[in-house]
Image (spheres, grey):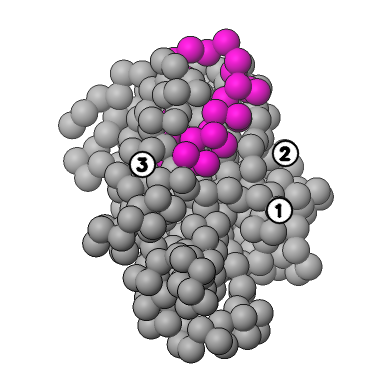
Amino acid sequence: MKVIDDIHGPAYIGDHGQIVLVASPTSAFEVVMTRVLAFDVGKSGCRVALFVDGRRVKGAETWGARGLADRDGLESTLTAIRSAADAVGAEQVDAVAAGVAGYAQAAGAGGELVDALAESHRTRRVAVASDMTTSHAGSLAGRPGVVVAAGTGSVALAIAANGITAVADGWGYLLGDNGGGFALGRRGLESALRARDGRGGSEVLRVLAQRRYGNLDRLPRVVHRSSNPARTVAAFARDVVSAARDGDEWSSILCAESGVELARTAAAAAKRAMPDDRAVEISTTGGLFDAGDLVSRPFASEARRLLPGCRLVPRAGDACDGGLLLATRDDLPHESLIRRYEGVPA
């Protein structure tokens, strides 16, 4: 068992790598939470974890939901949460937390979601935030710092010890999300089409694109007729990473440039939220970082160039671990980003 000495509050790493929370003497929450249900509600899937006495005992993943700010987003989110809760069979819990995609843009829907969760789970200990907030709390075990998420898109959230926050990028695939999966997939496809036309590019990526999408003459139709064009293009990022691992120089350059862009996003958020912190901690999450050193090494190099003295730390936990912290602690630097239940449960 490894005790975490520098966590923002007492906890330790359990036998299976999970964050195990210990009751905080500084927290205003005096009730010891024994059963906590934590949700990570994304557009591609809804993950849930049941914690008993701080230990994760059950988990499941079901279908995702529309963004909370989208039309019918609240009902879609509640449907996904109900399905996930049923999957772990959690009928009675002491606290509920949910990190939800689209929360930051949802205005009043966040309050409605909190009330609905309090009523359905018969508890007044409810905490709701964006999925990026719970990812941040889980990745850094509640400590201040910067977390960069890179999946289809990309965004960085910086939270200082005094609660000041800053977000960088996350503008969507048409306007930003630099270095994310869509950006890498699109650049890979651009290279494939250049090779197809005889304008340079990568012949390796041309072959891989044709294998994934079929005749490249029809690629625009495939993308634009897709129900989710961003995800269709981002899927090719896997092929770019695979080609880079096999030694394709063009693909290796694209992966490295993604890492550099993501580091610049992290640095921008850090400089706005904690300009005087010379030892800011940075962690990463999201599928793009599964590329390993192809992305992580240039990311680290650029981060250290832009933020001398920064500390790159491995992810301590996931968004459900972050939800556990949000549900059971009120003394984290994330507090301004959390909506809590204020009524009396039915």
> What is the tally of numbered marks visible in this picture?
3
Locate residue 94, reporting x and y percent. 50, 45
Secondary structure beneath dot 3 equals: helix
- Describe residue 110's horizontal placement relative to residue 182 as left or right: right
What distance separates the C-alpha of mark 3 from that of mark 1? 24 Å
What distance separates the C-alpha of mark 2 from that of mark 1? 37 Å
Type of the residue with mark 1: Leu
Judge whether residue 110 is colored magenta. Answer: no
Q: What's the mark number on residue 296?
A: 3
Residue that numbered label 1 is attached to: 175
Q: What's the mark number on residue 342?
A: 2
Quarter of the image with the N terminus is top left
Mark before the other along the chain sequence, 3 or 2:
3
What distance separates the C-alpha of mark 3 from that of mark 2? 42 Å
Locate residue 319, reporting x and y percent. 47, 46
Q: Which residues are magenta?
A: 260-284
Compared with 266, 240 (above or below) is: below
Residue at 27%, 34% (x, y): give it.
13
